[in-house]
Image (spheres, rainbow, N blue to C red):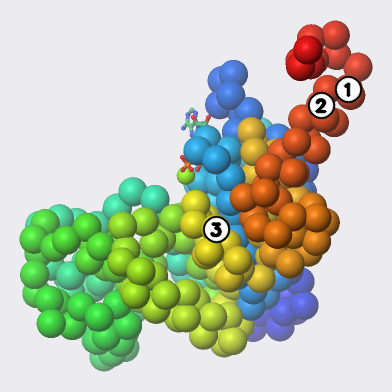
Amino acid sequence: MSSSAHSDVAPIVVSDVVKRFDKVTALDHVSLSVLRGETFGLIGPNGSGKTTLIRMLLGLGRPTSGNISVLGRKMPSRQVASRIGYMTQSSALYNELSIRENLAFFGTLYGLRGRRLKERIAATLSLVELAARADSPIQTLSGGMRQRVSLGCALIHEPELIFLDEPTVGIDPELRLAFWEYFAQLNQRGVTLVVSTHHLDEAARCNRLGLLRFGRLLAADSPDALRARSGQQDFEQAFLYFAQQAETAEAGEPTPAAEKEA
Ligand SMILES: Nc1ncnc2c1ncn2[C@@H]1O[C@H](COP(=O)(O)OP(=O)(O)OP(=O)(O)O)[C@@H](O)[C@H]1O
Ligand SMILES: [Mg+2]
């Protein structure tokens, strides 16, 4: 690896990013950094911009304004693709193909060949506990099993930066825990993760969390710091606190149309 020049640069730097779709502002002046070897969580209501942010970080679409740098490259960049893993919110699997064939497809796409590819398929099957079903077509699997295959496809090439968009939806509690234990192991090896979730127990396991609402980053800090800053015991309350802070700030802006409760 010849990336030592970038080794002390944060793997993700987002600077004042705005993303608009027609009239919708999906990201509204978002700035944040993600550090090497941490799990950075994204939480926020439906439509708050989590998937949009992840897609911009992957270089799938350009920001309307602002800058994104990933692994030392200004995005979008093709050069970092092989060093990144992505598990989408909706499945990207081939339903007629078996688990093994899907893993082989994604592995090949990421440049794995021959014995190395075989080794990685075997290791991934064991990681997601699906070795016994390796030759079953995806369409014959349960929803949670498919989710596990999707995770495997994102990890097959041992990327150093992984984006997981709601990776544990539909997964049973035991395996959910196993996923998070595995994420912590990846962190210890220096792998950086960005994970979106609606589960507050998962949010609590992240090193740092970004709270999104209407495309705005309300706060980005460790779970403990967020609780302390809000003076609240749990995240639900902490999140509401930051949301109310944002509303108060908006109401304080000099716009005659600012909504105020009677
Ligand atoms: N391709 C697109 N075209 C138009 N609008 C879009 C597009 N992608 C996202 N949006 C809009 O941007 C906003 C943010 O959507 P996004 O998918 O990022 O939310 P999210 O936080 O991931 O929500 P969820 O929790 O439901 O997954 C929404 O209002 C959505 O409708
Ligand atoms: Mg989403």
Q: Which mark is residue 253?
A: 1
x and y percentages locating residue 140 in the rendered image = 8, 61
Marks 1 and 3 sit apart, C-alpha to C-alpha, by 31 Å
Marks 2 and 1 sit apart, C-alpha to C-alpha, by 5 Å
The image shows residue 14, relative to residue 194, as above or below, that is above
Q: Is residue 138 visible?
A: no
At label 1, the amino acid type is Glu
Residue at 32%, 83% (x, y): give it. Answer: 127
Q: Residue furthest top?
A: 256
Q: Secondary structure at mark 2?
A: helix
At label 3, the amino acid type is Leu
The image shows residue 211, relative to residue 81, as above or below, that is above
x and y percentages locating residue 71 in the rendered image = 65, 67
Residue at 55%, 40% (x, y): give it. Answer: 45
The image shows residue 217, relative to residue 251, as above or below, that is below
Query: In the rendered image, which residue does mark 3 sit on?
Result: 200
- Residue neighbourhood size for the residue with mark 1, other residues' Cα within 10 Å, grouped as few (<14), some (14–19), many (≥20): few
Q: Nearer the viewer, residue 9 or 132?
A: 132
Q: Nearer the viewer, residue 202 or 3?
A: 202
At label 2, the amino acid type is Glu
Query: In the rendered image, which residue does mark 2 sit on?
Result: 250
- Choose the circle earlier in sequence order: 1 or 3: 3
* Residues under numbered marks 1 and 3 in contact, where contact means CB atoms less than 8 Å apart: no
Is 8 positioned to the left or the right of 209 in the image? right
Q: Is residue 123 visible?
A: yes
Q: Secondary structure at mark 3?
A: helix
